[in-house]
Amino acid sequence: MIIVIDGPAGSGKSSTAKAIANRLGIKFLDSGALYRAITYLWLESDKPGKAEFFENLSNVRLQADYRDQTFYVQADGKNLTDKIRTKYVADHVSEIASYKTARRFVNEFMRNLVKEDTYIADGRDLGTAVFPDADLKFYMDASLKERAKRRFLEMKASDESITLEDVMENLRSRDEKDQNRENDPLKKADDAIVIDTTGKSFEEQVQEMVSIIKENVNLN
Ligand code: DC
């Protein structure tokens, strides 16, 4: 069983999906974390051709697990969970995620993972390309200004030099890359329910989505 949430960067998908997973007692799958993990592996490698690198990634034992409200990622037994949240990785992930071989690897990994349990997953192309037959699809959005404000408040705690303008520019450029790439761009699925979170509190949006899930999906 799989419920998906797609939407642009900073629309609140991950934190909302996590809160919903906890309330419903299901698992959370963070597809962006998988793209970040393979980006980290590429950056730490001796950087052969990218297409070939991702084609041969099946030699790496990638593991993902959701517990204690954290989505853990490991490669060959090494914990990458914190390493993938750096600016170093964030600056390269959109480019890496545009490679067909990288997308094929991540998609196959996710399709295998969800066979074993009930998941709510967040990403960009889950309802369109990865799980077109998902049990329920959401598309979360908010204005660029509101998304940037939220991200800025999160990032300011660990990086005092960051400005709201920096964050807005990073989101704008990532949205543009994610929406215009050739392979599986960010796009609302025709049958996705749109949740616009501009002006809504976190609790309001979580409640709204939990109610929709309970009305539409049999979780037992
Ligand atoms: O959700 P996030 O910001 O952690 O995602 C990091 C990047 O991964 C994002 O800029 C685009 C890419 N991504 C993708 O191409 N497809 C997905 N399903 C999820 C993320």
Image (cartoon, grey):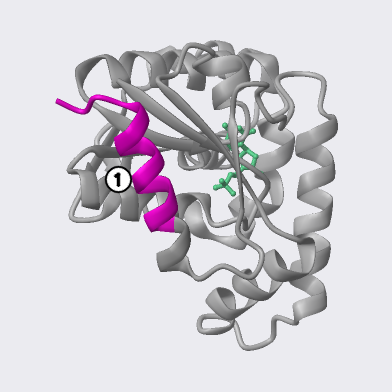
**Number of numbered discs visible in the structure rendering:** 1
How many other residues sit within 10 Å of disc 1, few (<14), some (14-19) or many (≥20)? some
For the N terminus, the image quarter is top left
Q: Is residue 80 visible?
A: no
What residue would you read off at disc 1?
72
Per the picture, the main secondary structure of the magenta-coloured stretch is helix
Does the stretch in magenta take in 117?
A: no
* Highlighted magenta segment, given as a residue range: 206-220
- Residue 162 higher or lower than 127, as above or below: below
Image spot of residue 41 (x, y percent): 50, 36
Residue closest to the eye, 69 or 146? 146
- At 21% from the left and 28% from the top, the residue drawn is 219
- At 40% from the left and 20% from the top, the residue drawn is 135
- Residue 169 higher or lower than 25, as above or below: below
- At 22% from the left and 44% from the top, the residue drawn is 24
Image spot of residue 129 (x, y percent): 61, 16
Residue closest to the eye, 36 or 18? 18
- Give the quarter of the image for residue 160: bottom right
Q: Amino acid at mark 1?
A: Tyr
